[in-house]
Amino acid sequence: MTVQSPTTRYRTVFISDLHLGTRGCRSDFLADFLRRTECRTLFLVGDIVDGWRLKRSWYWDGIHDEVVRLILAKAKNGTEVIYIPGNHDELFRAWMPLDFAGVKLREEAEHVTADGRRLLIMHGDEFDSVVRYARFLAVLGDWAYTVALVLNRWFNAVRRRLGYPYWSLSAWAKRQVKGAVKAIDRFERALAQEARRRGFDGVVCGHIHHAEMREVDGILYLNDGDWVESCTALVEHHDGRLELIDWAAQNRLSHWRVAPQRAAVPVPA
């Protein structure tokens, strides 16, 4: 399998659903990705920090710090960084629009590719009826999802000992459930319809932790995935070509590649 060169340069990078502040966040793989890629524009498409989880229990280690430092360093060194909050970091929505430390906080954004396609950028939870209208069910689903991620972590610990690379058990299980597959399809069609209604050629989103790139009735639907299960990013090459990058699979990642550079933040009393 081909491994990328130490630094790969893209025109644009889209990442979402990092869920910093949770043990399920693959901040080690994400830091590796951020160190080895450069871009003109970086879109953070929601659920970057998991405010829901941090309200209940505090978790933040040195690699989480490293991810934040790498993003801020990109902003300082000339990368345009646009942060679109999602439902898990919705507390930032009250501050929009705001520019801080070189990062632009926006409700949504528009991106024009090098070959002239107009893309609507949004997290996507606005089109998830469970999150919008039944918050209790959303929180309950978040708890069940957390359990699945714990199982995923133990599953991959065994794979690592056997010499196998990272593979998402939780993502595989979700793809096997017919109800989940139908819900994903409804979500994708709703986002594509919104992009069409507003005159865009396509839409980039996150939220459902399911990386995808396909046409829906002539509209390009692009979901950049997540850094909890799939460890994926959407990238635009300099000629406008769009590609989904499965970072863990592409680089056969199976262990912690980025060592913490600070001690873990202590739990507040």
Image (tube, grey):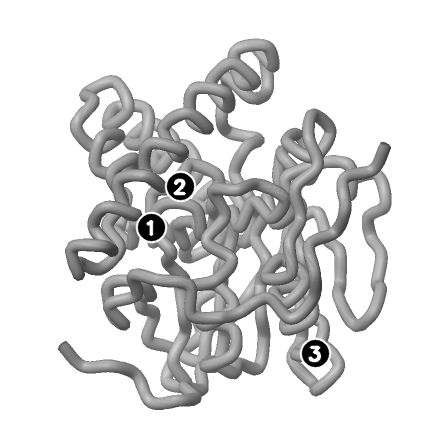
Label 3 environment density (alpha carbons within 10 Å; few <14, some 14–19, many ≥20):
some
Do the CB atoms of the residues marked 3 and 2 lie less than 8 Å apart? no
Q: Quadrant of the C terminus?
A: top right
Query: Looking at this view, is 117 or 32 the one in front?
Result: 32
Q: Nearer the viewer, residue 78 or 127?
A: 78
- Whichever of callouts 1 and 2 sits on the residue coming sooner in the sequence is 2
Quadrant in which residue 241 is drawn: bottom left
Q: Residue at x 70, y 37 (%)?
A: 58
Q: Which residue is mark 2?
A: 209
125 vs 49, left or right, is left
The residue depicted at 23 percent of the width and 46 percent of the height is: 158
Give the amino acid type for the residue marked by disc 3 in the picture.
Ala
The label number, if any, that marks residue 73 in the structure image: 3
Q: CA distance from mark 3 to mark 2?
A: 26 Å
Image: 265 above or below 148: below
Q: Is there a contact, CB below 8 Å, between mark 1 and mark 2? A: yes
The x and y percentages for residue 198 are: 53, 46
C-alpha gap between disc 1 and disc 2: 8 Å
Asked if the residue under mark 1 is in contact with the one under mark 3, i.e. CB atoms within 8 Å, the reply is no
Dot 2: what SS? loop
Q: Which residue is mark 1?
A: 230
Q: Residue at x 59, y 44 (%)?
A: 47
Q: Nearer the viewer, residue 210 or 148?
A: 148
